[in-house]
Image (cartoon, rainbow, N blue to C red):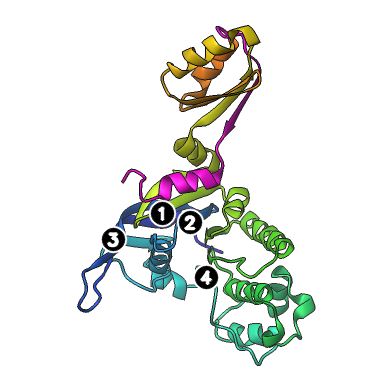
Amino acid sequence: MTTTAQSAVDLVGVTKTFRPPGADPVEAVRDIDLSIGRGEIVAFLGPNGAGKTTTLDMVLGLTDPTSGTVSVYGRAPRAAVLGGLVSAVLQTGGLLHDLSVRETVAVIASTYRDPQPVDEVLERAGLSALARRRVSKCSGGEQQRLRFALALLPNPDLLILDEPTAGMDVGARHEFWATMRAEVSAGRTVIFATHYLEEADTFAERIVMIARGAVVADGATQEIRARATGRTVTATLPPDRLDGAVRQLRATDSVTDVDTAGDRVVVRAGDSDAVALLLLSELGGTGLEITTGSLDDAFLALTSDGAQR
């Protein structure tokens, strides 16, 4: 990895419109502005048809934007791919089932001018013990690891992963992400699309949510949770003050809901700091807790058809 560009990926005003014969144009991506820095780990989340794959295809140079610009380390996407700066791990295709794992890596390595050593790539992908196994005998998860090994051959700066752990069990997913953390620690940038919200929550430093072809949220996981669902403040109140406290809390700005569970009051609010101060000072609350909503809640709130456009 030799590039010194500040940004790994830049999208400026990117729109992609498909024009099927005899049908109305389909705007798959609309006016996306997005910058991803070197060494970032970014998860793309969104429902099916949201525009995630189309956006990644433009970053890989597989399709061109209808308008706007896409650059990868300051280059056109196809030039960055041809220069070995970018590799992708896709869900399907690209494997020769009659070859062994090692033979497959060796064949693809022969197509590069200066590939990484085959045995080193197999080790980094956790495939050394499977090197002699025929690809057709590999599980779906093992084939995904093989695709990852192939992606490492040009020693890329940027890895783009489309549902990288599809077909893996829980243990294999953990092992895969441990391997990816080691790659990121070497300075690589990782962009991955996933349907596993827990995976994005635990691995990504930044989440970009896409819905209806546009970015609807972009930030750290906790920021997105708070933006979509607010925070929940819970405290214990004196029993003789509970009813009055509930009425006061419901009249407080930014409070969206108040529930009780015994002598505990549960308050959902946008301004959790103000609610916490009120509970601890005026209302005599104790045992205060503040939590954010789950990433699942944020995902549904931000990507649903009823979300604000």
Q: Earlier in the sequence, mark 4 or mark 3?
A: 3
Asked if the residue under mark 1 is in contact with the one under mark 2, i.e. CB atoms within 8 Å, the reply is yes
Q: Real-space Cα distance between discs 2 and 1?
A: 7 Å
Camera-side residue: 260 or 81?
A: 260
Q: Quadrant of residue 62?
A: bottom left
Mark 4 Cα shell of 10 Å, populated few (<14), some (14-19), many (≥20): many
Camera-side residue: 80 or 126?
A: 126
Q: Earlier in the sequence, mark 4 or mark 2?
A: 2
Which residue is the extreme one toward the right? 129
Work out whether 134 lies above or below 196: below
Q: Earlier in the sequence, mark 2 or mark 1?
A: 2
Asked if the residue under mark 1 is in contact with the one under mark 4, i.e. CB atoms within 8 Å, the reply is no
Q: Earlier in the sequence, mark 2 or mark 3?
A: 3
Q: Real-space Cα distance between discs 2 and 3?
A: 17 Å
Camera-side residue: 89 or 286?
A: 286
Magenta span includes 290: yes
Q: Nearer the viewer, mark 4 or mark 2?
A: 2
The residue located at (32%, 70%) in the rendering is 64
Q: Which residue position holds label 4?
A: 88
Q: Position of residue 219 (x, y in %)?
A: 47, 43
Asked if the residue under mark 2 is in contact with the one under mark 4, i.e. CB atoms within 8 Å, the reply is no
Three-letter amino acid code at the position of disc 1: Ile
Three-letter amino acid code at the position of disc 3: Thr
